[in-house]
Image (cartoon, grey):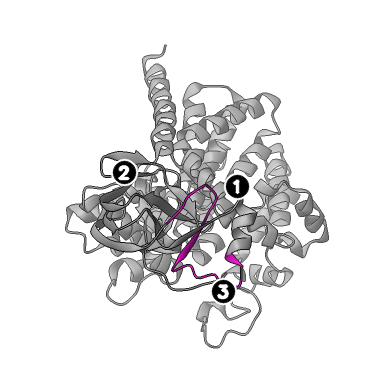
Amino acid sequence: MNGLLPILVLLVEVLVFYHKVLFQTGQFFIPYDFESYHLPLAEFIASSLRRGELPLWDPFPYCGMPFYADLTAQVFYPPTLAAVLVSNWIGGGNLRDLMEWQLVLHVFLGGVFTYFLLRRIGTDVTGALVGATIYQLGAFFASQTQHLGAIDAAAWLPFAWWGVGELAERFTWRWTALLAIALSMTVLAGFPAVTAVIYGSCILLAAFSVRGFARVVLAAAWSLLLAAVQLIPTMELTRLSVEKYRSDWLGNGGGLSLQSLVSLVMPNYYGVLHFDPAAWRLPWNPTFLYLYCGIPALIFVATALLLRPNRRARQFGILTMVCVFWMLGASTPVFRIVFRLLPEMLKSFLYHPLPRFFLVDRVRHANDLQGALASLRTPGIDLRHEAVVEVEAASKGSGLVRVLHYDPHEVSLEIEAANDSFLVTSEAYYPGWRARVDEADKPLVVTNVAFRGLPVPAGRHRVTMRFEPAILRWSAVISAAAWLAILLCFRRARTGA
C-alpha cells in the first residue's frame, strides 16, 4: 500500500466509527460535556461575531467573566474558529454538526500524524497503518469524545513527537517552527491536562539526545509565544479568580484506579459500553474505566520490547512506563509523595438576590481584602443598602438607576440622585473595564470583594462602562510577532537561504 491509500483507509475507519453522529444527526449526537459545555461556548463566539463583536466579556456565568481568557472556550483555536465562521456564513443553524465534524476530523488527524510518525522511525506501511488505527480508534479518543479540547489537543501528540525526532537528528528552523506550531495548538485547544502530557513527553523524548533537548526547549519556548494571545489572559484570569486555589483541593493528585487496568483486556468488564447513568453505582467515572486498545496492541508492545529491543523501542518503552505511572496517579504511593512536592502552579457568604445595578445608602471602608471579607460576614449587613469597598468613598443617599443600553461589552446607565451616591453592580470586577461619568473618565472600585462599583455625584448623570482589555492587545502583539517569525522561517527554508 503506497501513496494515499493508507490515509483513505484511516479516513474510512473514522467515518465508520462515528457514522451515526455524522450522518444520522437527527437521532444521534455527542452528549454530556460536548453538548452542555463546549457547544454553548462555540455558540457564544458565533453570536458575538454575528453581531460584529469580539467575544470579550460573558455576563452570564459567575456575575460575568472575560470570555477570551477562558482557555476551554477555544477562542483562538483555528479549527474551532473555522467551524464557527462557516456556520455563520451558511446561516448559523448547524453549529452542532460542524463542531462534531471538527472533533471527528481531529481523531482522523491524530491517526494521520501517527502513520507518518511511524513511517519516519522505520515502520513499514502495514505496521504504520495498524499503529495509526490503534491510536485513532483506541481508548483515549473513544472514551473522551465528549471532551472537545482533549480530542483536539491529543491529535497533535504524534506530530509533536515527529518533530522531536527530527530535531534530535539535526537542527533546522523549519522543524523547530513546525514543532512550535504543534505545541501551540495543544495550548489553544484548551485542555491543560493533555497539553501538559504532550509538553512533558516531548521533553522526555528529547532528553535522550543532548543536542536535541536544547532544540526542543527552543521550540517549546517559541510555542508559548505563539499561544501568548491565550496564555497571558488566562494566567491573569487564574491569578484573579478562585482558580488559583484549585491545587488546594486536589488531594493526592487523582488518577485512574488500579481496577481500570482490567479494561485493557476486557473492555466491557464494568459495563461502560452500555452505560446507564441511573443504574451506575461504582465510585469511578465510567470514562476512566475504558483503556482498551485491542489485544493485538498489547502483543505488539510486548513483542517490540522483548523480541526487538532496539534504541527506539527502549525510548518509547521508558516513555510508556512514565505515562502509566502518571496515569495511575494517586493509585501508586510513589506518585502521592511526588505530587505533594510539586509547585502549586503545576497542580493545577452571605447571599441576597440583588439588582444588577443599584445605588446604596451607605459605604463601609475596609483596609484590605481580609477586612472586606470580615465586613461581609458581619451579622445583619444588608448589601441592598450598604457596600463594602477598599478605598475611601461615601454615599449620602440612594436614588434611581435606569438601564439605557446593555450588551456584554458595554453598559450605559442613567443615574438620578439628590445627593452624592455610590453605584453598585452585581457584575464582576475585572481589569479592562473602564467607566465614564458623563464625559469624564472615572476609576471603578472593587466593591463587596468581587464586584464593580463607582462613586456618582448628585444630580442626573450618564454612566458608561466598557470592557477594553489592554492585556489582549499586547498579548496578541506577542503572538503576532511569533507567527511572523514562523512565516519568515518557512520563507527562508523555501528560498534555501
Give percent across and percent down for residue 308.
71, 45
Q: Mark 1 or 3, which is nearer the eye?
A: 3
Compared with 467, 228 (above or below) is above
For residue 196, the mark is 1
Residue behind mark 2: 436
Seen from the viewer's position, the closer of residues 353 and 241 is: 353
How far apart marks 3 and 2 lie (CA) works out to 33 Å
Cβ atoms at labels 1 and 3 below 8 Å apart: no
How far apart marks 1 and 3 lie (CA) works out to 47 Å
Q: Along the horizontal axis of the image, is 10 left or right of 282?
A: left
Q: Residues within 10 Å of mark 1 (few under 14, many from 20)?
A: some
Q: Secondary structure at mark 2?
A: strand
- Residue type, mark 1 in image: Ala
Measuring 44% from the left and 34% from the top, which residue is drawn there? Answer: 475
Seen from the viewer's position, the closer of residues 67 and 178 is: 67
Q: Is residue 290 visible in the rendered structure shown here?
A: yes
Q: Verify whether residue 410 appears in magenta.
A: no
Q: Is residue 146 visible in the rendered structure shown here?
A: no
Compared with 441, 358 (above or below) is below
Measuring 76% from the left and 65% from the top, which residue is drawn there? Answer: 331
Measuring 56% from the left and 63% from the top, which residue is drawn there? Answer: 139
Compared with 366, 215 (above or below) is above
Give percent across and percent down for residue 300.
64, 55
- Residue type, mark 2 in image: Arg
Q: Residues within 10 Å of mark 3 (few under 14, many from 20)?
A: few
Q: Secondary structure at mark 1?
A: helix
Give percent across and percent down for residue 311.
71, 37
Residue behind mark 3: 380
Start and end of the magenta stretch?
Answer: 376-395
